[in-house]
Amino acid sequence: MTRTRTIGRFISNRTWNFTPISGSRIGSHSLNQLRMSSSATAAASEAETAAAQKNYQVVQDSGNFDEIQAKRPDFDHSKPIEVTKSPNPNWEYGQGVPNNGASLVGKHHEIDPYASDRPMINNYRLLVSGIAPRPVGFLSTVNSKGEKNLSPFSYFQVIDHDPPMFIVGFSSRPGRVKDTYRNLRETGECVINTVSENMIEAVNATSIDAPYGVSEWDVSGLHEAPSTTVKPSRVAESVFNIEGKVIDIKEFTDHQQPGMSLAATVLIKATRFWVKEGTANEDYSHIDLEKLRPLGQLGGMSYGRIGSTFEQPRKRWSDEVGKSEILAKLDAAKPVDK
């Protein structure tokens, strides 16, 4: 499917819209225009990059991590996922948080993320520790020459099911953009792979700053599986794979700093699902959590596993209004539609 693009500029930002027309790849004319019209892949000067690197240290120093980890208990792969009651099963409408006001104790501290005296790294650490857990986005891509890349992402999420849509965020960084971002811009294709507990060391290994030309597939030892609608391979060890194609890219040009690449978000539309047999129900509409064993990213170097779950059903106003005094009062006081 050939793809053309339209360009729009909004509040000093750049948007690439990949509009499906026919065929399976971005047309060469459009691809050349895309390369020429964006500075995102242009390498910053060595001096600017070196200066930017001094203020960019998002990789936490692991120090004597091996020594620390040796003192911790072993990871229990056989530990079942427990199902418990919800935190407050007797909660009633209008009750808020039932902890005797403990959640209201203490003031909030206001922060300007753009303050001149606030280092970028503080925003990074605050966000990854405060917005947690986050799913691991594990993307396989290829460039226009067919060279392969495999990389995990912290800023990733599914955003819709009809059509199935995903978003990946690329942070500004010293020098040129990440290979994954460059590949998505060049070919418009990827595979999103889920990450289970038993995969994390191999997945983490793909984030190493390997020299140019070294394959993350070889570094990790993960295995390739063929895809149907895109050129990048699937990760065979993953329970769930999503083939996808880029439909939109937004670059944040107004926030670019000297020596740093552009920050950007990429919108991806799924073109094919793959679910490992024996991990889902009969019609492949639900994956067994015990088989998926997903991980969540937390702050710093930390990850979280799922040790227990609870259920919280959604309810309908028409079913609940007759059971609750406060809902009945709100219903009686609601404006009358004209």
Image (cartoon, grey):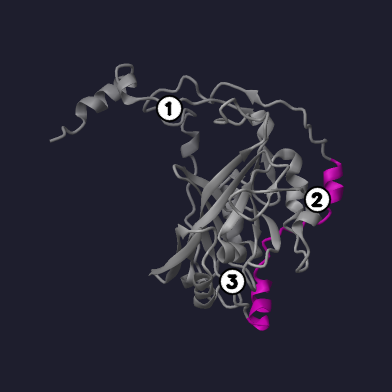
Disc assigned to residue 261: 3
| In the rendered image, the vertical position of residue 309 relative to residue 62, given as above or below | above
Q: Which residue is mark 2?
A: 221
Q: Secondary structure at mark 1?
A: loop
Q: Quadrant of residue 294?
A: top right
Disc assigned to residue 314: 1
Spatial CA distance of label 2 from label 3 is 30 Å
State which tag comes first along the sequence, 2 or 3: 2
In this orientation, does residue 249 appear? no
Return the x and y of residue 75 as percentages of the image width and height.
79, 35
State which tag comes first along the sequence, 2 or 1: 2
In front: 257, or 29? 29
Return the x and y of residue 95 as percentages of the image width and height.
40, 27
Spatial CA distance of label 1 from label 3 is 43 Å
Residue 105 in the magenta stretch? The answer is no
Bounds of the magenta span? 45-71
Residue 52 in the magenta stretch? The answer is yes
Q: Quadrant of residue 180?
A: bottom right
Amino acid type assigned to the residue bearing label 2 in the image:
Gly
Dot 3 crowding, Cα within 10 Å, few <14, some 14–19, many 20+: many
Return the x and y of residue 165 as percentages of the image width and height.
49, 48
Disc assigned to residue 23: none
Q: Residue at x 77, y 60 (%)?
A: 215
Spatial CA distance of label 2 from label 1 is 43 Å
Q: Is residue 190 left or right of residue 218?
A: left
Q: Residue at x 18, y 34 (%)?
A: 335
Mark 2 against mark 1, which lies toward the viewer?
2
Pointers 2 and 1 in contact (C-beta within 8 Å):
no
Give the residue furthest to the top: 323
State which tag comes first along the sequence, 1 or 3: 3
Q: Is residue 220 left or right of residue 317?
A: right
Q: Secondary structure at mark 2?
A: loop
